Image: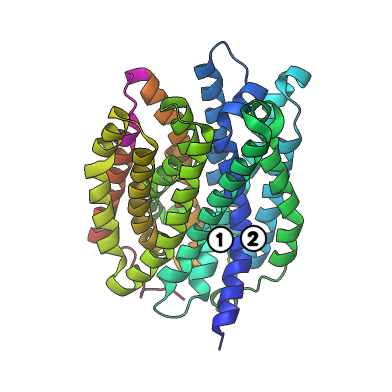
Amino acid sequence: MPTKMSYLKSIFIVSSGNFLEMYDFMVFGYYAPSISKAFFPAGSEFASLMLTLMTFGAGFLMRPVGALVLGAYMDKHGRRKGLLLTLGLMAVGTIAIAATPTYAKIGLAAPLLVLLGRLVQGLSAGVELGGVSVYLAEIAPAGKRGFFASWQSASQQAAVMFAALIGLVTAFYLGEARMTQWGWRVPFIVGCLLVPFLFVIRQHIEETPVFKARPERPEIGEVLRTTAASWGVVLRGALMAVMTTVFFYMITAYTPTYGSKVLSFSSRDSLFVTVCVGLCNFIFLPVMGAVSDRVGRLPLLIGSTVVAILVGYPVMHMLVQAPSFGRLLATEILFSIVYSTYNGAFIVYLTEMMPVRVRTVGFSLAYSLATALFGGFTPAISTALIHATGNKAMPGVWLSVAAALALGACLVGIAKKDGQASEGWG
């Protein structure tokens, strides 16, 4: 019988690579303005920033590919081997971005190498999140799957805070000018230095009892065919994941750019708000995961989407009418609580609604499609909406649209009785 200490060890080990994945993604989002000057010079600051944010989003286009290919590999060969492979790919993408010379030095090769690094990162991330979520859900004791699975998202929040803190410390010592010139590379280098340590601790991952108990291992072709046959469940899962992905990238990756470029706060203030958001998420995600174990997933899913639809634009409108550090912080914390409530129930719900034979690839594909088509492009979409309308509160509309899509998919799932944890879990 596993002990509490062994459970804690497993959660820490498996979440470590997830930490690196989100750290690398967040660093790129945080320093989009500096990266735009280094690799994507253009005729206007808006065009340069949009090229950078589209490159940020391009990494998400590879997620469905990673979900299918690496997810099928993981459902065939095991969670352990798959999670080690994804960590290696993420490391390659991070090193590529950190080491690429600027456009001024090597010309067009610079943005192409950065794009390539983002695509490799996206390939890895396509199954990393799903693999970790499935692993944690499969090792969880009865009645605690929501709490255990929520630590996947909580590890991402640790990465959000760590990346923002590294940025604050670096900016404090280097100043704005040197941060723009070369200081933005420091957080990427820190990420590279973490890779050997994370490889060592991930070597100790043990295969899940649920996977080991399966009498057969489906071939990759069979996994893909089963996934295709379950397209309706995957599509509903993807639509439900839209709210999670849009809210997450809005309140984390986009906050530094929105705070500094749209509301004219200092980058330090914006990064500090991001740290507070990450801390709030880190606290509330496991709490809401545990609550979902007690009251069920659906009350949290439906309640949070309804709140998001109602408050998305009005809250952003109040912020831009009289921008202040306090209002920005309060707005982001409110959205953080809404996000944590939804995500704490959603992650485990998504694992429960997927057929057991294709649990990893089904989860990963649903989440990756939502991220690729909606969430990952949230910074770019928000920037474009503000530019097109002149309304700085337009990101709030995007939040409400995402919540409406998720609510609709959730209601369809209820009608079709998806997400029944008791059916076919093992």
Using a 10 Å C-alpha cutoff, classify the residue at mark 2 as few (fewer than 14 neighbours), some (14 to 19) or many (20 or more). many
The prevailing secondary structure element of the residues shown in magenta is helix
Can you identify the residue that label 1 sits on? Answer: 131
Q: Is residue 417 visible to the viewer in this orientation of the structure?
A: no
Horizontal side of residue 413 vs 66, given as left or right: left
| x, y percent for residue 255 | 46, 38
Span colored in magenta: 388-398
Left or right: where 280 falls relative to 187: left
Distance (Cα) linking label 1 and label 2: 7 Å
The number of callouts visible is 2
Give the x, y percent position of residue 386. 37, 24
Establish if 313 lies above or below 353.
above
Q: Judging from the image, what secondary structure is the residue with disc 2 in?
A: helix
Q: Earlier in the sequence, mark 1 or mark 2?
A: 2
Residue that label 2 marks: 83
Q: Are marks 1 and 2 in contact (CB under 8 Å)?
A: yes
Q: Compared to 351, does 55 lie above or below?
A: above
> Would you say 166 lies left or right of 252 here?
right
Q: Amino acid at mark 2?
A: Leu
Closer-to-camera residue (279/228) = 279
